[in-house]
């Protein structure tokens, strides 16, 4: 009698909720449970099939490495463990490196597989990742790192540890050469991988359900016995902590990566902008005599109106395919400053601005647009990324000032603002700033060093708020209207002093009366400014920016 194989069940169980899932639907849904949303692990080949264009992946080679530097044995010889892992996975080691395309854009990808000895970082993995980075560097191709690891490979001892430095050097070389690096963190990413190339990329995307950290929960519990909080090391906690840019479901990853790669591709083509941009400006006011004199306190009220468009309103209406990037990679994400990459008439731009919100709940959650040290560090990180890729930068200013308080001061508020000012002085890409509402003190200026500074007709810009000035000099908060008049903070005076280059007239009654028209006018003014600046070589941009700053306060 011939034995027959047992039939494969049409159903399986979700590893997350243990509920039954139809096997074919589970496969089609990329091993994501439709019930609980659990993201099961994918192998490296499965991940490549999902992320890359069909038929585009070609393997990359690497220099052979030592196999068993310590002649290590625990309950089994290390070489035996390697053979078993290769047999079980069909892989040579815990990473697969290829050249490929995503959305038609070329990429070098290094994709880890947790099923191969826990995705541990040994000599072979370190060499393969380094070789992939070197190929990206040599060809000027963006590098994608997909991580899944329990840490450095213990069986290879100190040589495994050295792979952290080796791969970090490779990413530093890519950074110096202006090669875009992307990190896709999947579950889990720990130890030496988390403390090297996984967290050194320009943009870090965490897949929903991913965990990342240096020491894993078992290590922490086993060594120092701490009780871990809910959500510890989860992607969502990492996002709030400013340690990753985005968290996305598996189905959203491929289009997101294609969007990021397209920005690098635009820059590689020389950063062309539409010829029509140079003539796109709406009627702008360039002479202060052409603006009416207005009651300063009434203008302040208009500048603060909660119905005025916010940075995210401009992002949604002006930009296509906008993706907000988060975090300062140190402490937290500041909700008072928003930024990310989107397309303005097909041209990728970096948008950064204060985000106040419209209703009381959002305004409180956004701290009324008052940036923290983390917010200014985030904006600096995004500006450096724009400079690396050659993207124009648009900043939108609308804040009563930088956050004042113990937490901000101990976090280095003054240092963060100063660092932004210095950085913006030397950015080799076009920078356009628009004061869309309230420009308060150093918190506003931290986004305001630009080649062109524009202001809406009812915007205000000052060294201090009228209330602050009244409290200090009048010693009477009720003197705020008098202080506003004395500070001469309206658009007419800003234009007279040369603080702004032009004023964008607002719709009748103010921007809050017709937000859509306001956004359209700002968009036209910005594209015209970028159209002029795009033809200017970086050295000339910097020289003109320096001259602009140098003349402030100097008698003609």
Image (cartoon, grey):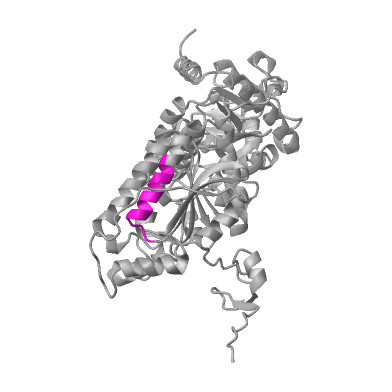
Q: Which residues are magenta?
A: 120-134
Residue 392 magenta-drawn? no
- Most foreground residue, 84 or 75: 84
Which of these two is toward me, 7 or 386? 7
Report the residue that reaches farthest toward the front.
Answer: 1
Q: Is residue 120 above or below residue 419?
A: below
**Rendered residue at 35%/70% (across/down):** 218
Image-based side of 49 in relation to 375, left or right: right
Residue 537 x/y as whole percent: 52, 18
Considering every residue shown, the one lying at the far bottom of the view is: 1
Q: Is residue 84 left or right of residue 12?
A: left
Res. 392 in view: no
Q: Quadrant of residue 16?
A: bottom right
Q: Residue at x 59, y 67 (%)?
A: 31
- Residue 287, x across and y down, in percent: 64, 14
Q: How many marks?
A: 0
Q: Nearer the viewer, residue 556 or 51?
A: 51
Residue 255: x and y, percent?
62, 49
**Toward the viewer: 157 or 216?**
157
């Amino acid at each position: 009698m011939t034995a027959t194989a047992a039939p494969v069940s049409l159903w399986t169980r979700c590893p997350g909720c243990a509920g039954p899932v139809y096997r074919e639907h589970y496969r089609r849904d990329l091993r994501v449970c439709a019930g609980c949303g659990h993201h099961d692990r994918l192998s490296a080949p499965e991940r490549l099939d999902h992320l890359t264009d069909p038929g585009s992946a070609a393997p990359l080679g690497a220099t052979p490495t030592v196999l068993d530097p310590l002649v290590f044995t625990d309950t089994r010889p290390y070489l035996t463990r390697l053979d078993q892992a290769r047999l079980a996975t069909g892989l040579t080691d815990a990473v697969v490196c290829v050249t490929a395309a995503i959305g038609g854009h070329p990429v070098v990808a290094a994709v880890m597989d947790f099923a191969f000895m826990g995705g541990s970082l040994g000599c072979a993995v370190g060499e393969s990742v380094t070789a992939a980075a070197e190929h990206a560097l040599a060809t000027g191709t963006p590098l994608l790192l997909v991580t899944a690891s329990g840490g450095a490979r213990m069986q290879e001892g100190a040589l495994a540890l050295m792979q952290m430095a080796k791969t970090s050097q490779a990413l530093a070389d890519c950074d110096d050469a202006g090669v875009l690096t992307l990190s896709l963190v999947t579950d889990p990413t720990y130890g030496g991988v988390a403390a090297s190339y996984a967290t050194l990329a320009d943009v870090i995307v965490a897949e929903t359900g991913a965990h990342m950290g240096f020491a894993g929960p078992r290590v922490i519990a086993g060594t120092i016995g701490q009780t871990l909080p809910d959500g510890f090391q989860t992607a969502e906690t990492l996002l709030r902590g400013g340690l990753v840019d985005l968290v996305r479901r598996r189905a959203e990853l491929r289009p997101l990566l294609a969007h990021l790669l397209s920005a690098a591709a635009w820059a590689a083509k020389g950063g062309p902008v539409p010829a029509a941009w140079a003539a796109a400006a709406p009627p702008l006011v360039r002479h202060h005599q052409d603006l009416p004199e207005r009651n300063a306190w009434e203008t302040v009220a208009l500048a603060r109106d909660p119905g005025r468009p916010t940075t995210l309103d401009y992002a949604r209406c002006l930009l296509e395919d906008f993706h907000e990037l988060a975090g300062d990679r140190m402490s937290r994400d500041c909700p008072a400053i928003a930024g990310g990459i989107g397309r303005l008439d097909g041209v990728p731009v970096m948008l950064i601005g204060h985000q106040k919100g419209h209703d009381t709940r959002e305004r409180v959650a956004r701290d009324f647009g008052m940036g923290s040290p983390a917010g200014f560090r985030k904006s600096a990180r995004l500006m450096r990324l724009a400079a690396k890729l050659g993207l124009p930068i648009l900043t939108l200013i609308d804040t009563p000032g930088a956050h004042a308080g113990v937490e901000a001061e101990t976090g280095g508020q003054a240092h963060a603002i100063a660092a932004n000012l210095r950085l913006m002085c030397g950015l080799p890409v076009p920078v356009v700033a628009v004061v869309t509402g309230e420009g308060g003190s150093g918190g506003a200026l931290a986004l305001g060093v630009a080649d062109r500074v524009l202001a809406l007709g009812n915007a205000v810009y000052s060294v201090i708020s009228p209330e602050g000035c009244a409290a200090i000099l009048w010693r009477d908060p009720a003197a705020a209207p008098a202080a506003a008049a004395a500070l001469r903070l309206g658009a007419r005076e800003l234009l007279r002093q040369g603080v702004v280059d032009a004023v964008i007239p607002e719709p009748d009654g103010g921007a809050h009366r017709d937000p859509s028209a306001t956004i359209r006018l700002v968009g036209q003014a910005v594209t015209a400014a970028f159209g002029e600046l795009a033809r200017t070589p970086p050295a000339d941009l910097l020289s003109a920016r320096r001259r602009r700053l140098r003349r402030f306060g100097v008698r003609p």
